[in-house]
Image: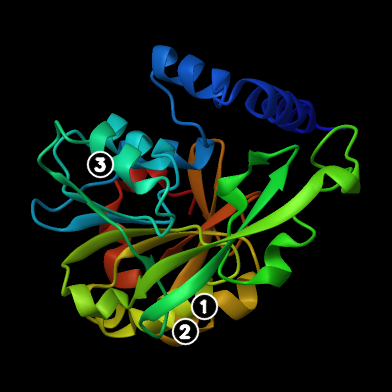
Amino acid sequence: MHVDAYIARAFAEVQGHCGFKPDVKRAINRVLQRPTERDFNALRYYLSADDAAYVDIGANRGNTVRAARLFQPNMPIVAFEPNPILVPALQKMFAGDRAIVVEPYGLSDQPGTFELFVPHYKTAPFDGLASLHYAEVESSLNCENLWGFDPRHFEVRTLHCNVRRLDDFRLRTGFLKIDVQGSEAKVIAGGYETIERDKPIVLMENNRPEVDAKLLFDLGYERYAFVSNRLVRGRLGDLNSFYIHPRRRTAFAAQIYAD
């Protein structure tokens, strides 16, 4: 069993009994100055334009915003997070950085107020697995990813969140990170005009990669995996994949490409 399954169980026990979230992994990574996900090491080689934003769609508790800032200290960042419980903490966390804007919205292809489903185990919220789609969370925790999983302690709670379209914000985008647990294709559809115009680098979790990336492929994007600190064209990454339009390959330093 993967070590993350044991970490997930430890989190559930401490959060459930003590009321706070232990985040030893994040604390260690901050000391070592490394991102929580290795794919974000690619941002070392990202050549950001001064006014093109890094857009974090599904900011959750801010780990990926911190990862972007670790390697890009001056890049404007717009972080979208639909969970109304997490938004105040994000706003407080980044209040000292004027180049970071926290937007209290989810993104999709239609604006409105929607239900956000959040899986819990022993009352501990696994908010990183929250989704606008119930089917995405009803089996999100199981024996494979949480050691000693007992379905009697699993429940899905519901919040209400505000949702908009990326195109509504009229942002100049250079890099999109999309981690939205089943809404990837709808996020892209709601930002199609923005993506078509700016051709941003897209880093997207591998949920349903062929379906979720269809509009990107239609625009001429190519898929890359980040392997051994190199971008390898045509491959699917282990957790996330990069989608890069040929016109934007120069957004990364040349030495990062394997071809």
Q: Given this view, does label 2 or label 3 mark the residue nearer the observer?
A: 3
Residue 51, percent across and down?
A: 9, 56
Characterize the local packing of mark 1: few (<14), some (14-19) or many (20 or more) Cα atoms within 10 angstroms: many
Of 20 and 235, nearer the camera is 20
- Dot 1 falls on a residue whose secondary structure is helix
Q: Is residue 220 visible?
A: no
Among the two numbered marks 2 and 3 on one chain, the one whose residue lies closer to the N terminus: 3
Q: Alpha carbon of mark 3 to alpha carbon of mark 1: how far?
A: 27 Å
Name the residue at 64% across, 57% down. 157
The residue positioned 63% from the left and 44% from the top of the image is 126
Residue type at the position of mark 2: Leu
Which quarter of the rendering shows the N terminus? Answer: top right
Pointer 3 residue: 91
Nearest the camera: 207 or 247? Answer: 207
Disc 1 target residue: 185
Taking the view exactly as shown, the residue that stands out farthest to the top is 31
Q: Quadrant of residue 166?
A: bottom left
Q: Amino acid at mark 3?
A: Gln
Q: Position of residue 68 (x, y in %)?
A: 32, 40
Q: Is residue 47 visible?
A: yes
Q: Position of residue 96 (x, y in %)?
A: 14, 31
Horizontal arrangement in the rendering, residue 76 relative to residue 110 (left or right) = left
Q: How many C-alpha atoms fall within 10 Å of the one at disc 3: few (<14), some, or many (≥20)?
A: some
At numbered mark 2, what does the secondary structure look like: helix, strand or loop? helix
Which residue in the structure is indicated by mark 2?
215
